[in-house]
Amino acid sequence: MPSEAAAAAHALTATTLDELETPALLVDADILETNLHEMQQLASDAGVTLRPHWKTHKCVEIARRQIELGAVGGTVAKAGEAEVFLAAGFDDVLIATPVVDPRKIERLIEARGRASLTVLVESEEGRRRWAAAASGAQRAVPVLLEVDVGMHRTGVPPAEGALLLAQEIASTPGLELRGVMTHAGHAYAAASPAEIAEIGRAEGELLVKTAETIRAAGIDCPVVSVGSTPTVRHSSRVPGVTEIRPGNYVFHDGIQVDLGVVPAPRCALTVLATVTARPAPDRVVLDAGAKTLTTDRGASGRLGLGRVHAGEELVVKLSEEHGIMRVDPDASYRVGDRVRIVPNHACVTVNLHDHLYVAREARIEAVWGVAARGRVA
């Protein structure tokens, strides 16, 4: 029998989708390129810089393509992700979540080398910890102050609520306040595109007001950075916003479709799965379970656990290795058939896989490693 290593080697040398063993994570090359170009054009039209969030794809090749198209650098969620992209030669990285472990802080200061590594601070204790490590560094550590514009996860209140910590950061040796940032993640619970637009405008306006408050106190605040794929079309147009940090747009997913951000054909990421059983006329079993597809159902609850690409069937239940799909009793699914499932949440799904199989129609054009997979620390 072939070894596990032999099976993996076969998958990496497959040239068509029919040769791939399933489950496998596919990227449609044409849709990916369309998504990348569209967001870069949106940034250019709005007069802002694009610093995409790399936690979505965790992939060096996609990050390089984003830079080629005009992105100024990248955003990551964790110290481990930053280390991966710094080691790959990227020279402008923002960590957009609080890092407060002194061991990680010291490691990051060393890992940045000559690169620009910007960090987020949203508390006095966070400022103090970065200050302790930065005091002995040869270069100052750039800092963005995180502002809470409605998600109520992390961040200081906007406008006057941010001023005290901004003053503390600006006056701390070894730290350099570059600006303010926020993430309007509460848009994912919006009930309509109109509500998303309202949240996006408020995201930009509150952050610009915060930057103006800081500047009025005599402190430089050049960067006004907003994020979120659903809101970016609206927040980027607010006068005074300077930077956008969407991530999911590279692939899009079931949640973006459900929110009305894009139509289903704009989803570049699918899971190729095989029908392994049809134990009842209305039930099909796939070889893609919770270890392959995310269990994230989205805020609306309308999504099931994945949807057939270019179809209506929903995955309704996941166990570890099995996906249960409800189908019309008259549907023609047979054991051995292959289906492509659009995951609800691309960012989580990618982190479950070692490789992205880049396909154009039925051919595999490239295999890209998920370089920052599992770098959750």
Image: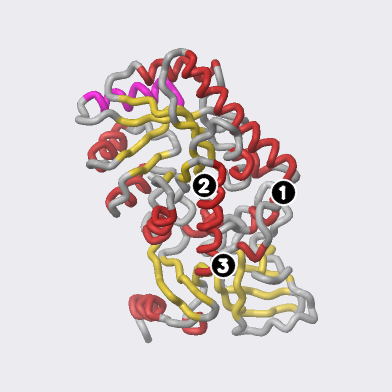
Query: Contact (CB < 8 A) between labels 3 and 1?
Result: no
Question: What kind of element bears circle 2?
Answer: helix
Question: What kind of element bears circle 3?
Answer: strand
Q: What residue type is labelled 2?
A: Ser
Horizontal arrangement in the rendering, residue 138 relative to residue 369 (left or right): left
Q: Depth-wise, is mark 2 or mark 1 nearer the camera?
A: 2
Q: What x and y, as percent, mark residue 121?
A: 42, 28
Decide: few, some or many residues near mark 3? Use Cα within 10 Å; few <14, some 14-19, many ≥20: many
Residue at x 32% of width, y 50% of height: 90
Q: Which amino acid does label 3 sit on?
A: Thr
Mark number, residue 300: 1
Residue at x 51% of width, y 67% of height: 27
Decide: few, some or many residues near mark 2? Use Cα within 10 Å; few <14, some 14-19, many ≥20: few
Number of numbered tags placed on the structure image: 3
Pointer 2: what residue?
A: 44
| Nearest to the observer: residue 326 or residue 93 | 93
Q: Is the magenta region chiefly helix, strand or loop?
A: helix
Estimate the spatial distance between the alpha carbons at disc 3 and disc 1, rounded to whole Å: 21 Å
Q: What x and y, as percent, mark residue 96?
A: 44, 38
Q: Depth-wise, is mark 3 or mark 1 nearer the camera?
A: 3
Q: Residue furthest bottom?
A: 1
Decide: few, some or many residues near mark 1? Use Cα within 10 Å; few <14, some 14-19, many ≥20: few
Quadrant housing the C terminus: top left
Magenta stretch: give its range.
122-135
Q: Which of marks 2 and 1 is nearer the N terminus?
A: 2
Q: Earlier in the sequence, mark 3 or mark 1?
A: 3
